[in-house]
């Protein structure tokens, strides 16, 4: 998450402990194992370097195979949940270059992160840091709520501060010197806090069956590379 949200940054561990209880975290981790295996792994070179921006409970980075795996988050609980071999850096995303060497990253991944930034300027600073650490040919992948689809439900989480549609996200990337190579307005449902069953075989089917994403997806997926 971003620097400068006042006392909220010092309460991240408490906030997410309240938002995701132990059973919910376990269920979410299993969901991410399937999504990483059946979808995100296709974007990750096994001999490459991957950075998880705002890694949280490390649901993505723990389930991805790569030569070097890096988790960045202000939440002190991130280090506790990181798998063996995952580097953890507790710092704001605007200071990513303080922890990751320029020109070394193959994929920077951000899931449900940028909606927590305080304003468009903070987003541009984060994107500038990401651009600096990506190697030539590296990419950033962004998954987050599409405010055009979730509407007022975007504000159901009190730490949501920066509403973006897939069009706004693509525009921000272009301003920051990226070229969008893939843009889906609809990908995953808005939240894992759903009454819909999350059995492994249903998740696999959902990922393969694009019409289901058009029906239920309210999170965007945007992939971009430096121009």
Image (tube, rainbow, N blue to C red):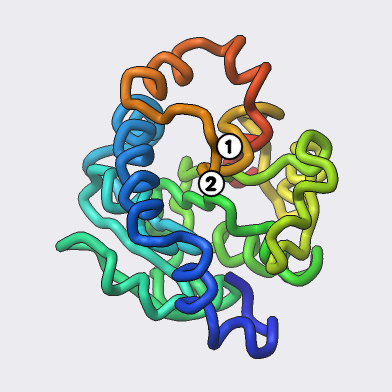
Badge 1: few (under 14), some or many (20 or more) residues near its Cα, within 10 Å? many
Query: Please, what secondary structure does the residue beneath circle 2 have?
Result: strand
Label 1 belongs to which residue? 223
Q: Is residue 212 left or right of residue 168?
A: left
Q: Residue at x 59, y 58 (%)?
A: 113
Q: Is residue 186 visible?
A: yes
User: Which quarter of the rendered picture does the N terminus lie within?
Assistant: bottom right
Image position, residue 88 (x, y; %): 32, 72
Q: Residue at x 33, y 18 (%)?
A: 201
Q: Residue at x 53, y 52 (%)?
A: 110
Image position, residue 84 (x, y; %): 15, 62
Image position, residue 224 (x, y; %): 60, 39
Q: Is residue 135 left or right of residue 193?
A: left
Q: Is residue 141 visible?
A: no
Label 2 belongs to which residue? 140
Q: Is residue 79 left or right of residue 191?
A: left
Above or below residue 45? Residue 90 is below
The answer to whether marks 1 and 2 mark residues whose Cβ atoms lie closer than 8 Å is yes
Above or below residue 75? Residue 30 is above
């Amino acid at each position: 998450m971003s620097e400068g949200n006042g006392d909220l940054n010092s309460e991240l561990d408490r906030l997410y402990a309240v938002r995701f209880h132990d059973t919910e975290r376990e269920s979410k981790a299993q969901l991410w194992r399937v999504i990483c295996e059946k979808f995100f792994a296709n974007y990750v070179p096994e001999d490459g370097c991957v950075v998880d921006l705002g890694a949280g409970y490390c649901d993505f980075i723990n389930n991805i195979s790569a030569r070097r795996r890096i988790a960045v988050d202000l939440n002190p609980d991130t280090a506790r949940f990181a798998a063996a071999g995952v580097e953890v850096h507790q710092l704001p995303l605007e200071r990513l270059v303080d922890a990751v060497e320029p020109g070394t990253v193959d994929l920077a991944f951000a899931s449900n992160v940028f909606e927590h930034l305080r304003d468009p300027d903070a987003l541009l600073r984060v994107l500038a840091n990401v651009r600096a650490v990506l190697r030539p040919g590296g990419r950033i992948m962004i998954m987050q709520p599409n405010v055009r689809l979730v509407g007022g439900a975007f504000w159901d989480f009190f730490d949501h501060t920066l509403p973006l549609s897939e069009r706004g996200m693509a525009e921000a990337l272009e301003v920051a010197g990226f070229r969008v190579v893939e843009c889906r307005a609809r990908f995953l449902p808005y939240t894992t806090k759903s009454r819909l069953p999350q059995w492994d075989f249903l998740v696999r089917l959902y990922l393969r069956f694009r019409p289901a994403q058009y029906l239920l997806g309210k999170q965007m997926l945007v992939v971009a590379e430096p121009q």
